[in-house]
Image: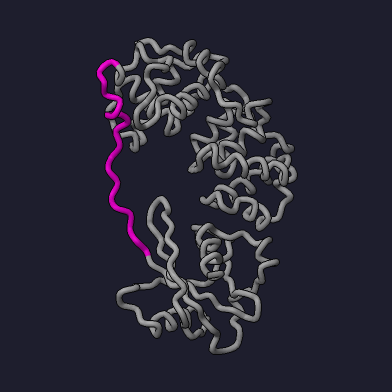
Amino acid sequence: MDFPSQELMEWFQKNQRPLPWRKAYDPYHVWISEIMAQQTRIDQMQPYYARFLKQFPNVHALADADPQTVLKSWEGLGYYSRARNLHDAAKQVVEKHKGELPHSQKELEKLKGFGPYISSAVASIAFNENVPVVDGNVLRVTTRFWGISEDVSLPKTREKINAKLNEVLPQGKARAFNQGLMELGALICVPDNPLCSTCPLQKECFAYRYSKQSSFPVKAKKGKAPQKHFAMAAIRQVDSLGFVQRQTALLNGMWECPMVEYSPLTDSTYDIEKKFEEMGIRIKIGTRKGEVKHSYSHFTQHVHVFEATLTNSTPSTLSWFDSKKLEKKPLSKVQLRVLELLKK
């Protein structure tokens, strides 16, 4: 089956959204936009994109920045490993490539945070390299178009789609072709109720021909995400709160009030106090202020917030921040919501 590449690119030329990084396709701008667009909708990330470029206008400014400043600039976007990888990769680009992003997918893959998708997206969109891009939108468009019924969560399925795209990608036009596919998935070939009447691929599309749009893409059903509960201690000292800096992979480098694992149906206040004592913080648990719930990709977090007071000298693990100091510290969405809760 022939793929209507020309019709796709003509559609893209006429219907593409006027996104800021498409004005000149500056490689740095394309890179930042692609990192931010991972796990975040385009309309949501654009204000962050504008502020980030104002604060870090080029790769040198980003490489020279303090890690905490970079994390603070990412506050609210979530998936903070993206910001840490971005910062590390900027330093690599400055130190090893004289401040210029490598032009090829293979070279880009050597940078921190450049997996198969990001490396191919930046290579093709910024430098027009002849490599296909496979993201969620492209998976939906291509599985519907070719009637691919294999599970798209499997690497071999993505490899199959990548190979088929390699065969139909018009040489020298990867930028328009790849963005056309992604834009089509974002605007027309949407998950529910796709706008097939306006699709440039309609005539040759398997799913449209057999009215099977809802059958693609095929995804294995995920198990129910585990529910994890934590007790967080809001420890006050005059007009400041006690914070710890996370050292774990999740939210590494971010600041939060200390918390411990918690079983709300069985743990008493004594049990909570003992758990905090094991981490070097001796406290007396007070009023329960409420609960903050947040869903990550692999679990749902329930944070039960308690007022607390120290029962011994200030532990070295705590840092004390008032509202002014907090303005410069990177905080997760959960912690920002906790602070709102504590104002009530």
Q: Which residue is at a point 70% across and 66% down the rendered structure image?
A: 324
The quarter holding residue 139 reads top left
The answer to whether residue 161 is seen in the rendering is no
Camera-side residue of 288 and 228: 288
Camera-side residue of 33 and 287: 287
Provide the major secondary structure of the magenta segment. loop
The quarter holding residue 206 reads top left
Q: Which residue is at a point 73% across and 38% down the rendered structure image?
A: 99
Give left or right: position of 292 versus 157. Answer: right
Q: Which residues are magenta?
A: 209-228
Give left or right: position of 260 versus 64. Answer: left
Q: Which residue is at a point 25% across and 18% down the rendered structure image?
A: 210
Q: Is residue 88 magenta?
A: no
| Quadrant assignment for the N terminus | top left
Q: x%, y% of residue 200?
A: 43, 14
Q: x%, y% of residue 175?
A: 56, 22
Camera-side residue of 88 and 73: 73
The quarter holding residue 147 reads top left
Give left or right: position of 149 versus 18. Answer: left
Q: Is residue 244 above or below residue 158?
A: below
Q: Is residue 227 magenta?
A: yes
The answer to whether residue 120 is seen in the rendering is yes
Q: Is residue 213 above or below residue 243?
A: above
Residue found farthest to the bottom: 312
